[in-house]
Image (spheres, grey):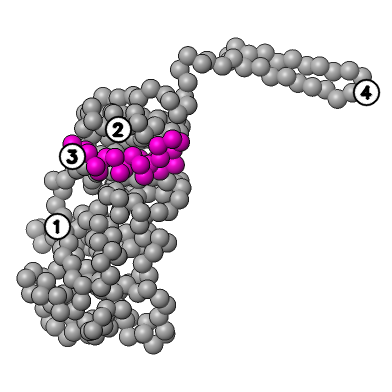
Amino acid sequence: MLGGSIAVDSAEGMETVFTLTLPADLRHPEGSDAAPAVGEATGGQVLVIDDDPHMRDLLVRFLGRDGLGVATAANGQDGLALARGISPSAIILDVMMPRMDGWAVLSALKADPDLTEIPVIMVSMIRETGLAYSLGAADYLTKPVDWQRLKETVDRHRLPSAPPAGLALLVEGDAPAREELARLLEGEGWEMAQAEAAGPAHARMAERRPDLILVNLDLPQVGGFALLGELRRDPDLRRIPVIALTEGGLSPEDRARLRDQVRQVIQPGEESVEELLDELKRIAGEREKARVKGQG
C-alpha cells in the first residue's frame, strides 16, 4: 500500500536485522515553509498561523465543520502576508514558531493600521496570558486545546454584533493590572468601567449601575473590605454579583467575612485566569437566562 519494502538479514547464531524502507514524497513538504492555504468561506474566514502541520489540519477540519473558511500559514512571515491579503475575521496564532515567533507576529499585526482591529487568539503550551493581553491579544488558549472553548472563543471574537455580556466595574489600584484585567473581560464580551479606588468606584456606579463588580481587597485609603460592606448595605447594589481579588492568602476570619458578600475570591495570576474566565461565563450565562425568561 505504501510502496516500500522490508528486508531481513539473518545468520545462524547472530541477531536478526529487519530493514523497513518507505518512499518519501518531497514534492510538497509539510515543514515550516509549507505554502499558505486558503479555504473557501461560507461562514467567515479565519486565519491559522502555526508551524505544526498536524495542528493546522485539525483546526481546518474542526472550524470547517461550521462552514468557516480557514486560511493557513506555516510561519509568521507568510501569516502576515496572508492577513494583509484576505483581512480575516479572526486569527489563531501559535506562540512557539521558528524564526518569527507568535509574539513578533502579534506585535506586527497590532502595529499595522490595516490589521490592528483583527482579533488575535493566541495558542500555546506555555501559559503567558499577561504578555499576550499586554501586546493586544484578544484571547489566550493553552494546549492541549479544549475544542469547544476554542469554538466559543472564535465565534465570540469574529461576531462583533453579539450583545455585550453586561457592564463590569473593575476596582483595582494598580494601573497595569487594571488594564490587563479589563482587556481580559472585554475579550469575554463585557463592557468595562474602571476605578482605581472606592471614591471613583462610587462615581462610576452613580453614572450607571454595573452588572458585575470586581474589587481588589487591597485598595488604598478605603479598603476593599470596607467597599464591599458599603455595597451590601445599599439596597440598589447588594444584588450585584461581586468577585473579590486578592494578591495574597486570606485568613480564615477574612474568608468568613467574605462568604456572604462575594461570589468568588480569586488571586490574580497565570494559574487563576481559567478560574476567572469560568466564573465570568457562569455569570454571563445566568444573566442571559434571566433576560430570556423576562422576555417570555
* Inter-mark Cα distance, 2 to 1: 41 Å
The kind of residue tagged 3 is: Pro
Residue 143 shows in the view: yes
* Inter-mark Cα distance, 1 to 4: 80 Å
Q: Earlier in the sequence, mark 2 or mark 4?
A: 4
| Quarter of image, res 121 | top left
Position above or below: 259 against 270: below
Residue drawn at 29 percent across, 25 percent down: 39
Residue drawn at 8 percent across, 69 percent down: 208
Q: Position of residue 178 (x, y in %)?
A: 26, 65
Position above or below: 296 against 219: above
The residue pinned by badge 2 equals 80
Question: Does the magenta run of residues contain 96?
Answer: yes
* Inter-mark Cα distance, 3 to 4: 73 Å
Q: Nearer the viewer, residue 18 or 239?
A: 18
Q: Quadrant of the N terminus?
A: top right
The kind of residue tagged 2 is: Leu
Q: Which mark is residue 113?
A: 3
Q: Nearer the viewer, mark 2 or mark 4?
A: 2
Q: Nearer the viewer, mark 1 or mark 4?
A: 4
The kind of residue tagged 1 is: Val
Q: Which mark is residue 292?
A: 1
Q: Which element carries disc 1, helix, strand or loop?
A: helix
Q: Tell me, yes or no, whether the two marked residues, 3 and 1, touch with CB atoms within 8 Å.
A: no
Position above or below: 96 against 283: above
Q: Position of residue 231 (x, y in %)?
A: 18, 81
Q: Tell me, yes or no, whether the two marked residues, 2 and 4, touch with CB atoms within 8 Å.
A: no
The residue pinned by badge 4 equals 13
* Inter-mark Cα distance, 3 to 1: 39 Å
Q: What residue range appears in magenta?
A: 92-115
Q: Position of residue 40 (x, y in %)?
A: 26, 24
